[in-house]
Amino acid sequence: MTAPLVLVLTLAGGPADSREEALKRAVRRTLGPAATVLVDTVPTFPHDTEALALGTRVSATAVVEVSWRDDGHAWLHVNVSDHAEWFDRDLALEATAAPDERGRAVGFTIGTIVLMAMATPPPQLSAPPPPPPPVARRPPADVAPPSPVSTRRTELAVVAIWTPTPGALPRAGAAADVQLPLWDRLALDLGATTTVGHVAEADADSWMLLGCAGPLARAVLRRPFELDAVAAACVMREAYSRLGLTRANVAAAGKGSASGVVWVTPAVGVTLTADVTSIFAAAPIVVGTTQVAERPSVWLSVGLGARARF
């Protein structure tokens, strides 16, 4: 039997201590002294197919993603060669455990999963329970995978916008927003939207620019699907033109937004958005010195576009 080789992927910027060396020693102690453990640091975890491709390049018996969390937990995502299944483990380690003890607990867990998977034919393979290391306790069944937001870089989205709300001014345009990560599942969203349209009842052309800023909350449904929600304060400038006359005004507004993202690659995704915008004061449409219509105080917009992370 060929000596096993385990490829371990960890995130860049993780803890700089002895836990990874302890992890490698524990894996070799479980799989045998001939086993090889390679540790590679990546900026973000790749998709499963890309992780398997990395394992194939080094002829790895198993590929493991390890995420060290600030609350003491360690999240494992494990695949053993010739098996389609990935095993997920959330190890709830003692908060006072030393880095060596945390590394050993994670290493023994990885070694046990690999041993059981190698000894079991793929059709009958089931996810084995974690071993009972001294510093680990069995996690509850409803523990969810940690969000990768805290490790992500700045994101940029560009979408095409349409306002279909009955009774509102029909508008079309484009929007762009930048997300600056702050904490786990939280970011600062800065956005700008420009639209054009026509007010049929006033026979006037319209143009609007909306600048917004506010907090963004993110939920990771299941890789590669994500859901974002934003509550933002905005400044709106719009202008109306009729018979050669133009009138512009500025108003304060608020916007609530929800968007879904499907990441096609680790860096590029498709996004679908829905926005509800409300102005804080009545906004009559005035061209020249004549009021020609009333601006709706609340309107809905939908958008479709692309998102990229840097």
Image (spheres, helix red, strand yellow):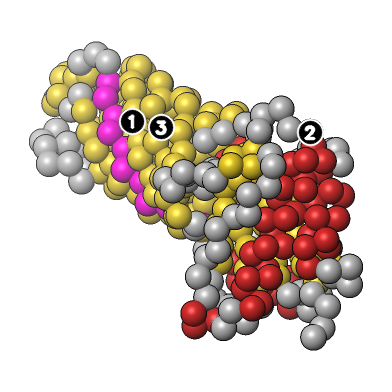
Q: Residues within 10 Å of mark 2 (few under 14, many from 20)?
A: few
Q: Position of residue 36 (x, y in %)?
A: 86, 68
On the picture, is 132 further left or further right than 248? Answer: right
Q: Residue at x 29, y 30 (%)?
A: 277
Q: Position of residue 40 (x, y in %)?
A: 81, 58
SS type, badge 3: strand
Distance in Å between CA atoms under marks 1 and 3:
6 Å
User: Which picture quadrant has residue 240?
Assistant: top left
Q: Nearer the viewer, mark 2 or mark 1?
A: 2
Q: Earlier in the sequence, mark 2 or mark 3?
A: 2
Q: Which residue is mark 3?
A: 230
Magenta segment boundaries in residue numbering: 265-279
Question: Can you say whether 126 is above or below 213 in the image?
Answer: below
Q: Residue at x 27, y 15 (%)?
A: 280
Q: Which residue is mark 1?
A: 256
Distance in Å between CA atoms under marks 2 and 1:
44 Å
Question: Can you say whether 133 is above or below 211 in the image?
Answer: below
Q: In the rendered image, which quarter contains the N terminus?
A: bottom right
Distance in Å between CA atoms under marks 2 and 3:
39 Å
On the picture, is 148 further left or further right than 4? Answer: left
